[in-house]
Image (cartoon, rainbow, N blue to C red):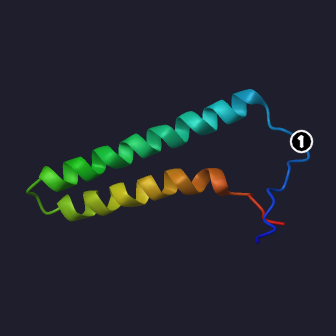
Amino acid sequence: MSDFEVARRQKQEPTATLLVRFIMCFALFLGGFALMAIGSIGDGGASPYLFVGGILAVGLSFGLPMIGATER
């Protein structure tokens, strides 16, 4: 079996900071979906770049909260 444990934080961040981080990541997540939608229905030369930008934005919205996470 795995002995994976989540490293506990020494000091909890303020609630306002956590709320702002959540709202920012959620907006980035929804904005990424919007970019993918615009890129998939558009017929211009920028459509592939918008679609790839949407994929990167969604990935970043999942990756930003993981900054500073550690594994014991």
* Residue 21 in picture, x, y percent from top left: 62, 39
Quarter of the figure with the C terminus: bottom right
Count of numbered badges drawn on the protein = 1
* Residue 7 in picture, x, y percent from top left: 83, 56
* Residue 67 in picture, x, y percent from top left: 68, 57
Residue found 27% across the figure and 59% down from its top? 51
Residue found 53% across the figure and 53% down from its top? 62
Question: Vertically, is 14 above or below 1?
Answer: above
Residue lying furthest bottom in this view?
A: 1
Question: Vertically, is 13 above or below 44?
Answer: above
Quickly name the residue at label 1: 11
Left or right, residue 48 beside residue 11: left
Question: Vertically, is 4 above or below 6?
Answer: below
Residue lying furthest right in this view?
A: 10
Quarter of the figure with the N terminus: bottom right
**Amino acid under label 1?**
Lys
* Residue 47 in picture, x, y percent from top left: 18, 59
